[in-house]
């Protein structure tokens, strides 16, 4: 019998969190409540802490080797998503998801090639892709935050007319809208991409965080996605970004390409990272369930808090992650409400602008925190715009 795990989001006090030295807690002064970067205000899951402590006790701090990550993710994928597509033969460890994205794009595109993204999207999609000498082309999401297939086909067609082929960097689930793409949408993505000679690389880092009332579909599981590539990781689901590791996955028709990934890329992940991620995937299920229940409670709380303190803000609860996308345009705070919330309210949320087209007037808020902190943040944000 599994022991019930307490809500991880209610375990740490603000004073305890302020002792942290990571980006979320050290970027802004102590009078600012940080609800921005994708770190969670949770203790390290017990199975992960134990696995790390045991490794340190053994002096097991060398280089990673073996299939443990692929096997653990394979079991997790089978159990959670009913998908048996993760195999050691069609996977490779990479240092983290973004470096994995870069390596996958190098495998399937050449310098100068276009990489289509659905804006608004995770800002490093622009930074990393631009930095590697590829050109980001936007196919904005629809007003409902879902893939707009006319825009997507328009982008593919425009490139085809210039004789250009490249890649489509899909975010599944979508950061920042929290939209979880359906099997039908993913099948359409695969079909359109094949038609226009675009290779799909799917960033699926938020997959374990999908709420119980939605259903995550791995891109590689849909018909037509056989030549796709995907990046998965335990990093977001169990808050392990500081323990570097991730897994690149290939479909049957892209396995040979993945096998060509340079060996040195696999030297980037940390052995302790792999140990932590494996422990999370194998033994962190009850912890994850408790977290997902806590996030659901925070979504409900956010709805109440928005109604009370920021009634002009519109929000479509996103089941795909703990990051939520708030449309603040009705508050008339010009393009960047995040600046107002920070300066007048001392709350750090992400500005929507770096997320690309569709980001103006929006902010992204991280609800992976305690109900107390979330409540105080929304009270401060309301006061910042003259409510309360
Ligand atoms: C969509 C997406 N991809 C990648 C990352 C970063 O992952 P990693 O630290 O493994 O590069 C994040 C972090 O928030 C993310 O939201």
Image (tube, rainbow, N blue to C red):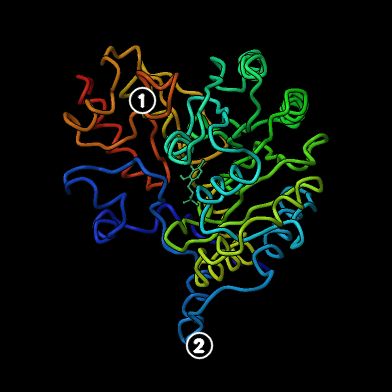
Find the distance from the CA under tag 1 to the CA under tag 2: 47 Å
Label 1 vs 2, first from the N-terminus: 2
Residue at the image point whose x is 50% and y is 79% from the top = 62
Q: Nearer the viewer, residue 357 or 73?
A: 357
Identify whether 60 is placed above or below 185. below
Task: Give the quarter of the image for residue 220.
Answer: top right
Mark 1 beta carbon near ligand 1 (under 8 Å): no
Q: Which residue is mark 2?
A: 58
Looking at this view, is 254 or 93 the one in front?
254
Mark 1 surroundings within 10 Å by alpha-carbon count, few (fewer than 14), some (14 through 19), many (20 or more):
some
Say which element carries label 1.
helix
The spot of residue 2 in percent (x, y) is 65, 66
Residue beneath disc 1: 353
In this rendering, would 89 be left or right of 106?
right
Quadrant where the image shows the N terminus: bottom right
Residue appearing at x 40%, y 20% in the figure:
327
The quarter in which the C terminus is drawn is: top left
């Amino acid at each position: 019998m599994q022991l019930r795990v307490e809500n991880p989001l209610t375990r740490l006090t603000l004073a305890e969190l302020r002792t942290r030295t990571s980006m979320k807690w050290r970027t802004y002064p102590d009078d600012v409540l940080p609800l921005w970067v994708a770190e969670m205000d949770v203790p390290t899951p017990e199975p992960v802490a134990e696995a790390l402590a045991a490794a340190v006790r053994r002096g097991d701090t060398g280089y990673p080797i073996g299939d443990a990550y692929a096997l653990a993710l394979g079991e997790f994928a089978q159990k959670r998503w009913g998908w048996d597509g993760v195999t050691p033969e069609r996977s490779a460890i990479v240092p983290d998801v973004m470096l994995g994205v870069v390596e996958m794009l190098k495998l399937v595109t050449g310098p100068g090639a276009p990489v289509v993204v659905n804006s608004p999207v995770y800002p490093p999609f622009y930074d990393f892709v631009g930095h590697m000498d590829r050109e980001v082309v936007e196919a904005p999401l629809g007003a409902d935050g879902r893939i707009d297939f006319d825009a997507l086909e328009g982008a593919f067609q425009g490139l085809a007319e210039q004789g250009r082929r490249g890649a489509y960097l899909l975010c599944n689930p979508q950061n920042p809208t929290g939209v979880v793409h359906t099997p039908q949408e993913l099948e359409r993505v695969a079909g359109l991409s094949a038609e226009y000679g675009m290779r799909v690389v799917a960033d699926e880092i938020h997959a374990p965080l999908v709420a119980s009332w939605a259903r995550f579909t791995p891109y590689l599981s849909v018909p037509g996605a056989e030549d796709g590539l995907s990046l998965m990781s335990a990093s977001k689901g169990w808050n392990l970004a500081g323990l570097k590791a991730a897994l690149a996955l290939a479909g049957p028709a892209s396995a040979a390409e993945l096998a060509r990934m340079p060996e040195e890329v696999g030297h980037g992940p940390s052995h302790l990272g792999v140990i932590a991620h494996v422990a999370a995937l194998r033994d962190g299920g009850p912890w994850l369930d408790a977290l997902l229940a806590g996030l659901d409670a925070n979504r409900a709380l956010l709805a109440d808090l928005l109604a009370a303190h920021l009634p002009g803000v519109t929000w479509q609860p996103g089941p795909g992650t703990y990051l939520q996308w708030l449309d603040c345009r009705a508050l008339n705070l010009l393009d960047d409400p995040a600046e107002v919330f920070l300066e007048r309210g001392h709350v750090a949320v992400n500005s929507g602008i770096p997320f690309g087209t569709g980001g103006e007037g929006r902010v992204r808020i991280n609800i992976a925190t305690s109900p107390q902190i979330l409540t105080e943040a929304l009270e401060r944000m309301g006061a910042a715009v003259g409510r309360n």
